[in-house]
Amino acid sequence: MKNEILRLQNVSKYYKDELIFKNVNLSIKKGEVISIIGKSGCGKSTLLKCINRLEDDYEGIITLNGINTDAIDLTELRQKIGMVFQDYNLFEHLTVMDNLIIGLTKIKGYSNIKAKEMANNILKRIDLVDKKDKYPDELSGGQKQRVSIARTLLMKPEIILLDEPTSALDKEMKESVLLLINELVKEDMTLIIVSHEEDFVKKVSDKIYKLSKNGLIESKE
């Protein structure tokens, strides 16, 4: 039986006096794929940000492997819980290669040679070796998103949060990103996906939840 890796207990979020969501409860086991759906503006992305403390001002308790995330060093927490953003969040002034190795060298302490070797391996996997010296503005949206996912993977997180990973992409680009996410699912990666791609999340998710102001409800559709 797989162990619980993440738990949210009565997590609520307000912006000033406005309620975004309240009493969110969720338990995720290692290797599970959870998707969160809901109306635009219901707080799906905000909930992901609470999980890795990009949003710190929330009520309730979030634990990772039984430890309150408030008690975990922020740099360490974000290595354990990686996030792939809707808008890619790549450094525009750095090449693809430098975007991939910056976390490995600055945070993980790898040498440049080792970091580049690891980055080259993952570039082969996502079929972008020929783009390693390009800058983000020279890439398509699908290529940027694959680089963003690859950068997160290189940090070897325990959980990956995917925030609308295909929302800005056309059909062909979506396919390449969805194929990569599907690979992660097969590798037993723990994923929390926020997506409008309901057909896709139905195929890959162990559970799908709908978020509203009143919390999370498991979708049985």
Image (spheres, rainbow, N blue to C red):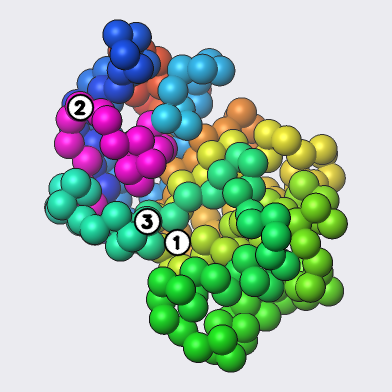
Tell me which segment is drawn in magenta.
47-64
Q: Camera-side residue: 148 or 38?
A: 148
Left or right position of 77 against 145: left
Q: Earlier in the sequence, mark 1 or mark 3?
A: 3
Identity of the residue drawn at 19% across and 46% down: 70
Residue 57 painted magenta: yes
Local SS, label 3: helix
Amino acid on which the number 3 mark rests in the picture: Arg
- Residue with the mark numbered 3: 78
Quadrant of the image occupied by residue 149: bottom right
The N terminus: image quadrant: bottom left
Left or right position of 12 against 93: left
Mark 1 is surrounded, within 10 Å at the Cα level, by few (under 14), some (14 to 19) or many (20 or more) other residues, namely: few
- Residue with the mark numbered 2: 59
Identity of the residue drawn at 21% across and 56% down: 72
Left or right position of 65 against 114: left
Amino acid on which the number 1 mark rests in the picture: Asp
Quadrant of the image occupied by residue 91: bottom right
Q: Position of residue 92 (x, y in %)?
A: 70, 55
Local SS, label 1: loop
Q: Position of residue 209 (x, y in %)?
A: 41, 28
Amino acid on which the number 2 mark rests in the picture: Glu
* Residue at the extreme front: 93
Mark 3 and mark 1 in contact (Cβ < 8 Å)? no
Nearer to us of marks 1 and 2 is 2
Instruction: Give the vertical position of 134 relative to 38 (above or below).
Output: below
Mark 3 is surrounded, within 10 Å at the Cα level, by few (under 14), some (14 to 19) or many (20 or more) other residues, namely: many
Residue 157 painted magenta: no
- Residue with the mark numbered 1: 188
Local SS, label 2: strand
Please indicate, yes or no, whether residue 133 appears anywhere in the rendered image.
Answer: yes
